[in-house]
Structures are given as C-alpha cells and as structure tokens.
Amino acid sequence: MTVEIRELTAYEDFKSAEQLQAVGLGFDPLDIVPYALLQSFATSGGAVVGAFSGARMIGVVMGYPGLLADGTPYHRSQRMAVLSAYRGQGIGEALKRKQADVARRYKLSLMCWTYDPLRSINANLNIHKLGATSRLYMRRYYAASTSERDAGASIDRLWVEWDLDKPLYDNHPVWNDDTITVVRDDAGWPSQPDLSVQTVDMAIQIPDDIDAIRLEKPERLAAWRDATSAAFTYYFTRGYRVVDYARNRGYLLSHDGS
C-alpha cells in the first residue's frame, strides 16, 4: 500500500479531517476540532497533515504554535487520528515526522503534546520511536473524554517534549539487567509502587492492552492508574525523566535525563 503524507490546504481536506476524528477516535461532535480551526492552524504557523491512501484520508495530525510558561516557543501537537484498519503500519510515526518538518520550517525546535501513559502503543511511538521524553505527570488532565475508548473516564496524561534538533538515533538508552522496576505486573494487577529506589535508572511497567482491561475489569484499570500515577509523580519531583519505553518492560526513567 502506498501512503501519501502531505499538508492540508483545501476545504475538502479539512472537512475530511473533521470526519476522520469522529470515525478514527469516536469523538462526540462537540469535541471534534472543526475545519475552520484546522484551517487557522494551517495558516497561522501551525500544521495540519494528512495521510492518504489514494484519494481517501486515513490519518491526520494537527497542531499549532505556543509558548511555555518561561516564554520558550514550541509547537503544540494537539491530536492525531488514524483509522483502525491502518494502524500498526507506521502511519502515525510518518505523520508526526512530517509535522516536525513543518514546525522546523517555522524555526521551532521543540514539539510537545500529551498522551495517556497507560497506552503501550502510544508509549512505543512517542518515547521509543520518536525519542521524546517526559518529566511531568498530569493527573485528571481531562475531566472526561467522549472518545469511544475513554468515554466517561477521567484521563491522566504525560506531557512529552520532543527536541526537534536532536538527530535521529539508533542507539536508545541502555536497559540494564538489574534495572529496578518500581511498579510491575503481578498476575495482571500492579504491584504497590516502590518509592524507596534511589538508583540512577528505574522502570515503571504498564499493561499491554488497557482497552481490554477497561472493558473486562475496570477496577483493575483504576488500580494501574493509581499505582503508576503515584510512581511517576513521586520520581518526577525528584529529578527523574522518562527516556525510553520497551514492551514488557515499561518505561525507563533516568535521573540525569540522558
């Protein structure tokens, strides 16, 4: 399958991006970023990038310029959606990388966004593949979501920072065999967070599929949320930063952020 990744400029494409948010993420109409705002993003220093299979839009990512509290300019990646039939084929990564190209064109060297830290697929893309890092856990960042996968739930988020000046790299941070896992899977349930670790590196494990847990055992999902949020929050305040993610091992946190 040939996929074209390009910036959106036409009214019809912006309208398609509206519909894709509803189909790809199951959002309520009131939570969809409308075409007029998407057009404003695209013409005001932001980015709206689509993935196309032939004439059909199968993915979209959108963002806009912003300022951090200290005045640092950055590109805020607001939302990405890929149709379910096309996930797992590298489309999300291609969209993000094209979005980064647009941000660089506007002389921005930092891209930031949020995502649910319990979503292993997102963690693998954002942290492992793109090389973004995180040092901020945002408890109940969204009061509730209307998306099909999170409907009615309060949603925690990791705030991630992607240094766009950092070259693409093949050598990820090293996972040591003796890295201590401060939250680990215990027969499907999270262990109690270990808040006594003082090593340079540590790990926080997450479930492989939180959607299955949410549908079958919501109380287990709540336990994972509580345990991981406690660990992230505690260690972030003590100078640790997420630097990598590995399936079945979780997040790697390093005290020096390397």
Image (cartoon, rainbow, N blue to C red):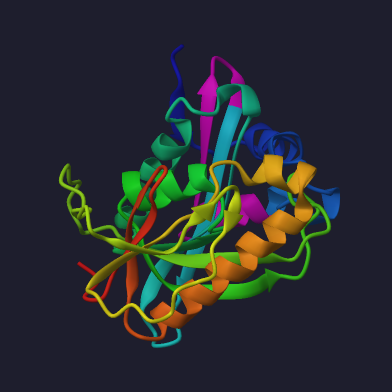
Where does residue 199 sit, x and y in percent of width and height?
24, 75
Q: Is residue 148 visible?
A: no
- Indicate the quadrant where residue 59 lies: top right
* Residue 250 is covered by the magenta coloring: no
Q: Return the residue found at the far top.
A: 1
In the foreground, 158 or 189: 189
- Please say whether residue 43 is one of the residues in the magenta stretch: yes
The residue depicted at 65 percent of the width and 40 percent of the height is 14
Q: Which residues are magenta?
A: 37-57
Answer with left or right where residue 96 lies relative to residue 173: right
- Determine the residue located farthest toward the front in the rendered image: 187
Q: Nearer the viewer, residue 188 or 26?
A: 188
Rendered position, 33 above or below 10: below
What is the quadrant of the C terminus in the image?
Answer: bottom left
- Viewer-proximal residue among 51 and 123: 123
Identify the image quadrant of residue 253: bottom left
Task: Tell me: residue 2, above or below residue 173.
Answer: above
Residue 119 seen in the figure: yes
Residue at screen point 56% across, 55% down: 118
- Residue at screen point 44% across, 74% down: 194
Q: Position of residue 201 (x, y in %)?
A: 26, 68
